[in-house]
Structures are given as structure tokens and as C-alpha cells.
Amino acid sequence: MPGIGFSQIPDSVNLASSVSAFDTARVHWLLQMAEQMLDENPDQAHRLIEEAVQVATKHHMISAMAEAELLTGDYLKRNSQCEKALERYERARMLFVQAGEEQAAMQSINRMAACNIDLGHLDEALRQVNWALGLGHLHNNKAVIGRSLTLKAIIYRQRGEVEFALQHFLEALQIAELLQETKLLSTIYSNLGALFLDADDLNNARKYLMLAAHYRQQENDRNGLAKVYSSLGVLFRRQDSLQQAQEYYLKALGLFRELSNRGGMALALQNLGVIYRSLNQPHVALNHHEQALAIRKELGDRRGAAVGHYNIALTYLDVRNAEQALHHLHESERLARQMDMRDLLALIPEARAEAQALAGNQKAAIEELRTALQHRDSLYNLDRLRQFDELHAKYETEKKDKELLQQRLELEKKNAQLHRQRLTNYLLYGGLSAFVLIAGLTVAMLRQRQKLERERAVEQTRRSIARDLHDDIGATLSTVTIFSSLALKKLESDASAVSQLLQRIRTVSEKMMSDMSDVIWLIKPENDSSEKLSERIRALAHQLLTPAQIEYQLDLEAADSRLPMKARRNIYLIIKEGLANVAKHSQARNVQVLLKEQSGKLLLRIVDNGKGLNGASATGSRYLGGNGLGHMKQRAEQLGGILHARGNEPSGTIIEAVFDLSAIGT
């Protein structure tokens, strides 16, 4: 209901405001109207929130105070004041907890995570998302689970972990479709569009962004629609359709201005500045970039200001003003270092080299160029190419895969040619001595690239282990926190419930310690041999099966050669998952584990005489512990192997996997 102000509150509410019942109605009305008006008239909404805070504080209405803090955080966040918004969300969370409204507290936690994502504090955001996700599962709140999965996907996207981002987006999408929650659907579609933009898959990007625009229009979310228009502008700019990009950026700017969204206005002005640079209108571009920078500074948005200074510097380079370019590059680097903006820091040296060359400072230009070249050949760029390949290998057909790969290779060749041309231009300033220096740098870079290629496989595995450990510990600690809070609440009223909660805390803590022990063992180089793997499996079998009074026979014929870390890790965890399922679910009296080399293959087989699959499909069997078989299959596939589960006559289950030893690097 746009345009409604405080003066239009029913007279009966205003006149009887001293009566508690009417004060309650008044506060709820104010907060309801503020929430409805937050997108259409944010300043008026903020005035309504402040009015509600005064009444709620006077009468100590804790829930209303919490809701007001939450809405104030939303107001600040939409104006790119995330640091202030974080304080409000934390106050709201504490008030909701004080009021005993744990479901509402989850909203505050997810909003805090969203703010930390905007600020680039991804580790803190992931901790908060795992916290909210744990609470969502505890209370079976599908809406909170869906939003938490979406935020987790956004974190993975910003980390450059494309596969994990896509996986979480698709999980969140299933929940949003089940709940028919259009706001969450539009958020997911917007982010999926951005994800495919990152991967230069413009067809899928356009499909999802158009879906997002449809839902944003359907729910009359003009702020969200403006953000989708901004992403569509990026898409058309990538396609060199500058006029269409300009149209979408102008649409976004118009909506942001109507909504008085200062942060959105800065983004749209910045994007238009980039377009005008591409259209060879540097003075118009400079005007837009300076307007955007002024808004960023006014809002205290240091990340946005860092980007703004960088864009202004590039525009000054276009008009050959080296002095102003260097000034803005200095400011951009200062802010980028404060905010740890590594992507931007990687771009600045090349622009500064061009500015130094333009100013006639040849020696400084060469030094900056050397720094720029080192950044271009960093592990970050190698990882981005790997993530691109992984995304398309998993989600595109083989034919399309080859076409996209060829297009990417052609694009890389064009980029390489362009880069060589720029090097040539720089060398014209530097003379023969610069040529000798660059040649030496090129040789060193080639050697460094070879070294990085050799280390990349090991680094990828270590990162995977670190990510799994980080997520497991985060989820476990969140669970311990939840159970501890519940135990404290029930300490005096329900001793038996406290005992059960403490037992659950002990169980999850012991599991975390066991998992950490496995990780420490797996990453030690001295454990690379199959003999060491056999010893670890024997210890595992004794630990899991002896307490359950299950007899076991282990045939672990060690291979002569060493197994790489990735192979040891996945084989060990497959066996651990299998034996854990036998101990917990099978009711078996005997189990056999076989791991041996046979004709260049590594054969893994786990056989038990328990209750078996009971006619159920392997993936759906309760005996296999829910997602346990799926995890085992994924680990086998990571080594190029295939894993199957089937019934064992007359009773029991057989799990079998076969690996090509040459393929897993033995």
C-alpha cells in the first residue's frame, strides 16, 4: 500500500494508545505497514519502524522490539550499510531468543549471513548459515532450510566452487518448488543466472534470469526486478549487444531511483559508466562513475568505492590523463587491501603499468608489468579454468561439451593474442632492456606453470578435505550449541531429557573426533602405501564391529605400489561408510571385506549375512543409512570406479567396487 503514512492509522488506535491492548495493535499495525512499504517507500517505512520502536520499548514488548530491529536491518542492508545492519540483526536475534521465538531467530541468523556475504566475510557467513541450517532441520522448518541452502550456494559461488554452488542451488530449488514460495524461487533463479554468467554459459544464464524477472514481476518486487535487470545488462554486455545492455541498465537505474535505493543506484550508474566507455564516450562514462563513487562514499561502502576508483582510473587512461589515473588506482588499492579484495588487487598492477608508461616512467611501468604477469599466472586463474570444465562436464551433453570447450579454447587464444599485443606496446616504451627482462620473466613463468600443474591435483584433494572438515566441524558445533541450549532450558524441569541431550552431544562430539583423526591420518605422506591403508582398515573394523558382536574376516592383499592421497582417502571412507552401515542397520553376525589387486584392477567387496535390502532399491534402502550409498558411489566415481549394491543369497548384502589402478595414479 504505497503512500500510506502514520497519519492514516485508525483514530481508535491513536486515541486509546495508553491502553495496552490498543498499544499492541498500534505497534503491530506500524510494523506490518513498514514491512509492506520497505521496497516502495523505504524512508517512510523507516519512520514507521522508529515509531513502533518507541511504543514497544515503552511497554517492554520484546517480540515487537525484535521485529522492529529486523526490519531496521533490512532497511540498512538495502542501502548497502551492511555493517550497521549486522548490529541490528544480532539485536533482533537476541530479543527473539529472549522471547522464546527460536523460529524467528533463524531469520535473523540468515540475514546476518547475507550481510557477511555482501561484506566478503565468507567464513563467518558460512558459520552462520550452518547454524541456521541446523536449527531449520531441528525444527523441520523447510522455508529456513531452503533459504539457508541458497545462501550456502551463494557462498560457494563467491569462492569459485561452482559445482558445490550448483548442487546447493538445485537442492534449494526443490524446496522452493515444493513450498511454492515465489520470493525464494525468484532469488534462486537470479543466482543461478549469475552462476551461469560466471561460467560464460550465456544461454542458461538468460533462461534463468528471464524466469527470475517473471517471478519478480509476479510478486511486484521492484527492487529484486531492478537487480535482475542489472544482471541482464551484464549478459548483453558479454554478448557485445551494448545498446540492449544500456537499456537494461537504464531500466534498473529508473527502478532504483523510484525506490530511493542508493546502493542500487550506485551499481546501475557504475554499469552505465562501463557501457559508455565501451561506446567511446569517456566523458559521459566519467560522469556516471563519479556519481556512483559519491554514493558509495556517502553510504560507507568501501568495497564499492574500491571498484569505483578503479573504473574512474581506467576512464582517465582512455583520455590519457596519467596523473589522475594513478591517483585513483592508489585509492582503489588502499581500499581493496583493507577489504581483502584479491580479484581487484590482481587487476590494478596492469592498469598502473599502463599509467606509468603513459607518464613516461619506463622503469616503474616494467616493475608493475612484472607484478601483473605474476597475477595472470596465479593458481586462482588455473582454478577458474578447472571449475569451468567441471561445471560443463557434469551438466552438459558430451556434444555440447566439446563445442563449449572449443569455444573456450578459441577465446583463450584471442585473450593470449590481445595480451601479447599489450606486452608489445609496453615494450615499445621500455626498449631492449625491458625485452630481456620480459623474456626472463616468461621463462620463469613457464617453469612456474609446470610446477603449479604438478601440484594442482594434490592441492585440489587437500582443499576438498579441508572443505569437508570445515563443514563437518561447523555443523557439529552448531548441533552441540543447539543441544546445549536445550539442555540448559530443561535442566530443572526434565532431568531425563537433559540426560538424553548430553548423550547426543557426546555422540556427535565423538564422531567429530573420529572424523578429525581420519583426516589427520589421510594427509600424512608416510601413510601413502597400501600396507598402511590395510592397518588402518583393520583398526576401523575392530572399532566398529567388535562392540556390535559382529565377526569379521579381512582379506587386504596390499598392492606393491603407493596409493595417492585421493585414492587412500576415498577407498578408506567407502569402507568406513560400509562397515558403519553394517554395524548400525544390518543385524548381521558376520562380515567379510576384500581389497586386493587383480589384473591391473583394485577390487573392493563388502559382504554381510544380515537382513539385506528386503526387496527395496539399493538407493532407497534404510539398511544403507539414507544417503550412505550415494556418498559411497560418489567417492568411487571420483576415482573412475563403479560401485554397486545387491542382495546376497540366502540373506545379506554385497557392496562391490572396481577401480583401474592406472587411472587412480598408482
Image: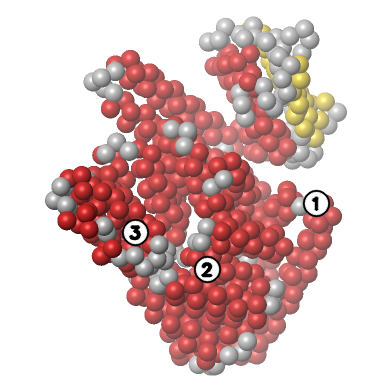
- Toward which corner of the image does residue 114 lie, by quadrant? bottom left
Q: Determine the CA span between mark 3 and mark 2.
A: 21 Å
Identify the residue at image location x=35%, y=70%: 300
Q: Which residue is mark 1?
A: 397
Q: Which residue is mark 3?
A: 34
Left or right of 141 in this view: 607: right
Q: Earlier in the sequence, mark 2 or mark 1?
A: 2
Residue 206 in view of the camera? yes
Q: Which residue is at 20% across, 57% downward?
A: 14
- Left or right of residue 505, residue 521 in this image: right
Q: Give the mark, 3 or 2, whose residue is nearer the N terminus.
A: 3
Q: Which amino acid type is marked by label 2?
A: Ala
Residue at far front of view: 12
Q: Say which quarter of the image contains residue 497.
A: top left
Q: Which residue is mark 2?
A: 226
Choose top left, top right, bottom left or bottom right for residue 118: bottom left
Residue 508 position in % (x across, y down): 45, 26
**Residue located at (62% from left, 53% from top):** 162
In the rendered image, the quadrant that contains the N terminus is bottom left
Q: In the displayed structure, would residue 557 be above or below residue 67?
A: above
* Cα separation between marks 2 and 1: 33 Å
Residue 448: give x, y in percent of width and height: 64, 62
